[in-house]
Amino acid sequence: MTAEHLPERATVPELAEFMGRSQKVVRECIHARKLKSDKQHKYLTAPVIEEHLERQGRLTRKPSLSSNGDLLPPTTWADQLKATQVEKLEVQIEELRGELVSKDEVKATLAEHAAAVRGALDNWVQYIAAEKRDPDLLEWAEQARDRALNGIEAEI
């Protein structure tokens, strides 16, 4: 269904499908606008979509100028919905092409790097203990290692 042919009223699952968002997001928009459903549990479509777009900071409130300086017509919620749907499709295409890295892959890579840093710091402390044999220096090295590891753990 295209933005021009959206029904005046729709259920939460239908709105979620139109908008390409979760039902939770739709319910948050409904709640924010204090919208009431009809007897078929349908809500006005336009206010829900407008609320979502405002939340996303995509609803243009200032008039836009074309390249020759003429005023462009204000962006409508239908235009914004089209733009949102296009953006969603672009992300899906990038995912299919393998151009995006998943959150799990990033976390796994960070964990591998953190383990390597942890091992290097432990080796450094062992070197200080074996070679320098200075209790104050060893204590300082252990504290430095612990501070570094705490910083790494906070980032993961």
Image: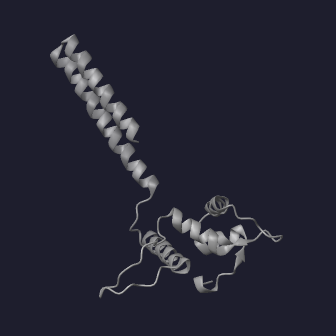
Report the residue at 29% width, 21% height from top.
Answer: 143
Of 28 and 154, the residue lying toward us: 28
Query: Residue 125 at x, y = what percent?
Result: 25, 24
Q: Quadrant of the C terminus?
A: top left
Report the residue at 34% width, 34% height from top.
Answer: 151
Query: Residue 150 at x, y = what percent?
Result: 36, 31
- For this orientation, the residue located farthest to the top is 135
How many circles with numbers are drawn on the protein?
A: 0
Q: Quadrant of the N terminus?
A: bottom right
Name above or below for residue 22 compared with residue 151: below
- For this orientation, the residue located farthest to the right is 39
Of 128 and 69, the residue lying toward us: 69
Report the residue at 41% width, 84% height from top.
Answer: 72
State the scheme by which the image is colored: one colour
Of 2 and 154, the residue lying toward us: 2
Tell me where residue 31 sits by quadrant: bottom right
Query: Residue 28 at x, y = what percent?
Result: 63, 58
Quick check: 136 left or right of 152?
left
Name above or below for residue 64 compared with residue 146: below
Quick check: 29 left or right of 64?
right
Query: Residue 86 at x, y = what percent?
Result: 48, 77
Quick check: 55 left or right of 24?
left
Name above or below for residue 88 compared with residue 151: below
Quick check: 33 left or right of 94?
right
Report the residue at 66% width, 61% height from top.
Answer: 27
